[in-house]
Image (cartoon, grey):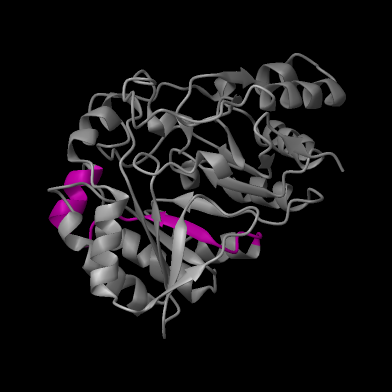
Amino acid sequence: MKTLIDPFNRKITYLRVSVTDHCNYRCYYCRDEDHQTNTVRNEVSSYEEIAKIVRLFSELGITKVRLTGGEPLLRKDILKLTKMLGEIPNITDIPISTNAHLLAPMAAKLKKSGINRVNISIDSLQQDVFKKITRGGDLNKVIKGIDAAIKVGMSPIKINMVVIKGVNDNEIEDMIDFAINKGIDIRFIETMPIGSAGIDTSNNHYSEADILKRVIDYLPNKLINVKADQTSGPAKSYLIDNTNTSVGTISAVSNNFCKSCNRVRLTSRGRLILCLGQENSVSLLDAVRGGMSDEDIKKLIIKAINNKPERHYFDTNIYNIENAQMVEIGG
């Protein structure tokens, strides 16, 4: 089987697939307040087109496919896609990222269709703060979604908290306790300057160093380093001794993880994004709809990977991708 190696000798094994750029939340670090999603159906990749692209990636060495959005559970008949992806040879891991608003009634069906693990965004345990960050989200539904995922046996379940100085940074310890009590994992994420929404939030940036100090002070002598595997994401993780919980940080800005980057992203419109912090991309959907052969599409993918940039520049140029919206890229 072929493998995808970029110009900096990084093996690409992980594809993040956005199935929609629509979302039922409007988190203010993710999208502008007046941003409207105007995508129409024929602009979005069909499930058959997504499955074809994923199959071609699998033939080039991709083994992990994460479904994202927007909010992926908004996409009609999402279980049809999870079943299709589960039938592709060499794809061994199909997690999903969600805000969990719609998860509770779908958790059992997702588990049955092959989604064994889930990442859930939850930025506050205080209803008023949660509603402010999400611009109207329902914290109770999110917690019910987390509990449903636990009940049906998804594992691991990871909750992600974007830490925003002066807004929710006072809840770091509460989030750790919440995760320990639920027996799930917790990741603290730095804000990223993607789009004007992300740039605005950069004024409230809370660094990985500050997060880790809080975690270490709260859990003295209880953190055990966890070694990442080949398809792991960018989190630095630590097991909390005598618990079933790990705690981690994702530091895209202050301590970037570009040297170990193993992933690319496919937007809902079928564009292959090579770096979250750069604008270069190529349309695989156009290639599929244009009748390009499988072998030529694979050559197009390989050519794109050969143009994958070495790194982003969140730390030196926050305006590099100011015209983007995180909700449209797929996180």
- Above/below status of 255 relative to 142: above
Q: Report the residue at 48% width, 69% height from top.
A: 225
Q: How many marks?
A: 0
Q: Report the residue at 36% width, 79% height from top.
A: 222
Residue 138 x/y as whole percent: 26, 54
Residue 111 x/y as whole percent: 59, 64
Quadrant of the image for the N terminus? top right
Q: Does the magenta run of residues contain 118? A: yes
The quarter holding residue 184 reads bottom left
Residue pushed farthest top?
A: 290
Residue 185 x/y as whole percent: 42, 67
- Above/below status of 316 relative to 247: above
| 257 lies left or right of 220 | right
The quarter holding residue 212 reads bottom left
Q: Does the magenta run of residues contain 122? A: yes
Q: Report the residue at 32% width, 31% height from top.
A: 193
| 129 lies left or right of 256 | left
Q: Report the residue at 64% width, 65% height from top.
A: 112
Q: Is residue 170 visible?
A: yes
| 47 lies left or right of 203 | right
- Give, as a single range, the part of the protein colored magenta: 113-134
| 233 lies left or right of 6 | left
Of residues 108 and 266, the one drawn nearer to the viewer in this rendering: 266
Q: Is residue 32 visible?
A: no
Residue pushed farthest bottom?
A: 242
